[in-house]
Amino acid sequence: MPWDLKSDRPIYTQLVEQIKLMVFSGTYPPGSKLPSVRDMAQEAAVNPNTMQRALAKLEEDGLIITHRTSGRSITEDASMIELAKTKLARDQIFEFLEKMRLMGFDQKEILTIITTMAKELK
Amino acid sequence: MSTIFECSGLTKKFGSKTALSGVDLKIERGQIVGLLGPNGSGKSTLIKLANELLTPTSGKILIGGQQPGIETKKIVSYLPERTYLNDWMRVQQIIEFFSDFYDNFKPEKAYDMLKRLNISPNDRLKTMSKGTKEKVQLILVMSREAELYFLDEPIGGVDPAARDYILETILSNYNENATVIISSHLISDIEKILDYVIFLNQGKVVLTSTVDDIRDAKGKSVDLLFREVFKC
Amino acid sequence: MLIKLLKYEVKATGRLFLPIFLSLLVLAAINKILSAFNHPTWTTPAVITMIIYSIIMAGMFVMTFTVMIQRFHKNLLTDEGYLMYTLPVKSWQHIISKLLVSLMWIIASALTAMLSTEIIAYKPGTLGKILQALATIHNQIIGNFGLSAYLLLLEMILGGLITLASGILIVYASIAIGHLFTRHKILSSFGAFIGLTTLSQIYLVLVFQITRIAHFANFSLYNITSNEFVRSELIFASGFILIAIPCAAYFAVTNYILSRRLNLE
């Protein structure tokens, strides 16, 4: 998966988001081992310190576990991943709703549009 | 974290022209630092002063707590903005030269990188293109396990593929306790790998900040901020 | 570190000198063989090889001189200096390594020149005659001076080396002084060379004057000792010191500039 980093936000927050996506999409399944910080940094073409910071944040959030000897791995706790996933979904939807509201749609209209679109996509 | 590079009141004049004036800086270990500024802002002058290739007009430099000299040269690896290789040696001989003089030079690292670039150790430096010579120089410089690296315009005037290779080489060879100071005027190309930036203009430091602070507080990229600061 | 510098200095210069030494000796040998035929058909080739030989000979001496300057200037004060000065090496070691290797090549050039003329002048039996003559000279000297002749010879060689070193160091010092100028560095170097030469002339004149005054003041080595050997040794020793002083001064100037006033652009 290519790393796509925008220039107007701190790089580490973007790394956090992208690693989360990789976990949710199964690129890194629960319990799997993560590459070393150095390798991950090199792959994303970012500073290892930044990658380190991103991983520390993910650890804080409980998505990543650091083993004393064998590096880092994704948590095996599926509920933890589910929780993070839901949180991310909520954040995205919140942002979306904000935008829609700015465009002048009310809640009902938004829901109608969503249901129609969902039907069309099927 | 401890300080690896420090200068205070550093001034350098060339005749009547002032290249650096009263520069105070403090750089910690374990970071990649961008020394950014337009052409002629004093980036190279600062780096050359740190390498004792220039004598300061006034002020002081400390590298790992010591003034530039033999001891600092052992821990500093420097990539100048020009090619300094003589033309009569073969790549293999220049590698031998580096291993002879620098205890922290790792020849196997150098050979490994050369192999990946398809540069034969038997090639003569004389027959190489400027671009290849620059890559050989970068390989030599990054094959040292130094505490402080000075890379003067490592990506100036190279094509995007070479630029990616160079940045990758820097990232993969840099260890967590070392500090890399990269000078450049091409900010968008390198800002992803920087921890910290120093803006230099007309011989003066105009801004020092972590990259995350710039993006967090100002919500803009280092490149954009640079364009604003140095607006003509 | 000095040993390593010397090693690379010899490598860098040897690739220039060794081929020219070899070609000089080979041409001398060819010339010898051609003229040995002593036949009209071989006269022209013999003359041609002689001309080429002379050109190479002249070239060799020009080269020892230019290489001496080039190695100091190009290797230390141009782009290559970026590499040399970031090595963990003191500047005096750079100067000494360049000086010693230059000395070595000057002596080697002189020896090669001598050897090649010997080859050309060689006739069956000459070698024996030369050795004989050398032996006679040797015996005569030993006869006159006794075993101290060896010491004398050693001192003469040493004196020659110091003089030679002085000649090289004055060039280094001139180049270094020229480097202090922001513009017209080469012109300034020439100016510095003329200035330094004048200074050393003045120095020599002063030294002569002082010895003369000392002589008039009835200060003479004869008053110190009546032993002829000790007296000659004293003369040598003072001579060494007198020629070594400017030599040391040139070295000090060069080293000061390279270590404290370096400005590579």
Image (cartoon, coloured by chain):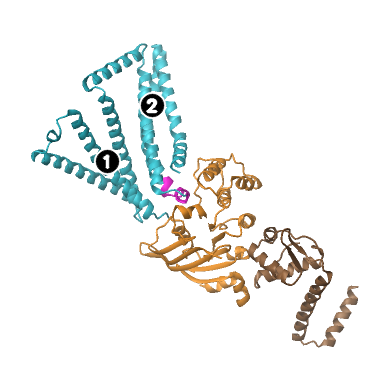
Chain colours: A brown, B orange, C cyan
Residue A114: quadrant of the picture: bottom right
**Would you say B181 lies left or right of C182 here?**
right
**Would you say C219 lies left or right of B87 here?**
left
Up the image or down, B160 lies above or below C134; here it is: below
Can you see residue C72? yes
State the mark number for residue C244: 1
Q: CA distance from mark 2 to mark 1?
A: 28 Å
Residue C263 coordinates in the image, percent (x, y): 40, 55
Up the image or down, B19 lies above or below C184; here it is: below
Query: Are discs 2 and 1 located on one and the same chain?
Result: yes
**Would you say A104 lies left or right of B39 here?**
right
Chain letter of disc 1?
A: C
- Callout 2: SS: helix
Magenta stretch: includes residue B123? no
Give the residue at x 63% y 75%.
Answer: B216
Q: Earlier in the sequence, mark 2 or mark 1?
A: 2
Assign the N terminus of chain B to one quadrant of the image.
bottom right
Front residue of B181 and B165 = B181
Q: Nearer the viewer, mark 2 or mark 1?
A: 1
Residue bounds of the magenta highlight: C74-87
Residue C124 coordinates in the image, percent (x, y): 37, 11
Front residue of A73 and B131 = A73
Q: Say which residue label 2 marks.
A: C112
Chain letter of disc 2?
A: C
